[in-house]
Image (cartoon, rainbow, N blue to C red):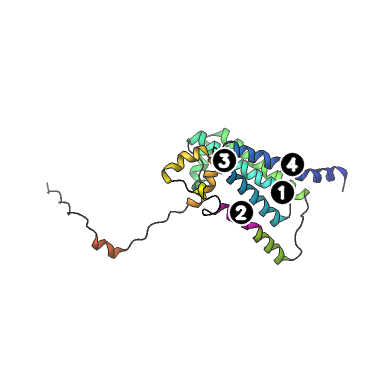
Amino acid sequence: MDRSHKLLRMLVVPIGIAVFSIALCWLLIAEDASLDRAFCTSIAVALVIFLVAACGRIGVALLLVGVLAACVRYAGLLKLRYLHEPLMGPDLRYFLNATTLDVIAHYPGMWHKCAAALVVGVLLVALFWRLEPPRWLARRLWQRVAITVLALLPLAVTAWPQGPFREVYNVGTWDFIAHAKLNPTSAFLTSLSRMRVTIPTYLPAAAAHYDWGPTPMSAPAT
């Protein structure tokens, strides 16, 4: 291994820390409430812990979470700029479709920046993966799986709507949009749990016992 390769390998973790810190600060500056800032920080740190346990690479985990955080923030800024609405979890359902691609195609400045950011992010993660050898990976597969599952617990507890950050989730439906404009990233994260609509249960037999009022008169024939 030549000297330059060794130097690059030594810089993987410091660069990952720098990218992670810059991206996280960029997110937190936009958050208005201290609890929401703590929520975003906890999610980011828990995700780093999970990725380190899964792949054994500290620099890669830090860089990947930093890139993801920057992408979420940048996507939120783009939606606010062009559509004047905050980024929400349900937007992920409609992102990769013909309508969205057609909209992006009409804004060259938008897709040029998105493409450049995507290419740079993918190349950096791939480069870091090759430079940094795995650390602390168990030799047996079942041990790796067990460690990865255990490392997933902090992320699951932090993201649980009834967990330590339940106050962040406890925002009324009518106040959620206003809250999202002041706390865009935490609102995006909490909106992921609102992507599925739960329809109230309905008993057809109960309709017979409901007073529907007088039957409307039919319109006279003309």
Q: Earlier in the sequence, mark 4 or mark 2?
A: 4
> Residue 176 placed where, x, y %?
46, 43
Q: Which mark is residue 155?
A: 2
Q: Which residues are magenta?
A: 151-164
> Residue 156 colored magenta?
yes
Element type where label 3 sits in the image: helix
Crowd band around label 2 with a 10 angstrom C-alpha radius: few (<14), some (14–19), many (20+): some
**Of label 3 and label 2, which has the lower sequence position?**
3
Residue beneath disc 4: 15
Mark 1 is surrounded, within 10 Å at the Cα level, by few (under 14), some (14 to 19) or many (20 or more) other residues, namely many
Which of the pair 2/35 is nearer the observer?
A: 35
Label 1 amino acid?
A: Val
Q: Is residue 147 magenta?
A: no
> What amino acid type is highlighted by mark number 4?
Ile
| Mark 4 secondary-structure assignment | helix
**Which residue in the protein does label 1 denote?**
60
Q: Residues within 10 Å of mark 3 (few under 14, many from 20)?
A: few
Q: Is residue 154 left or right of residue 176?
A: right
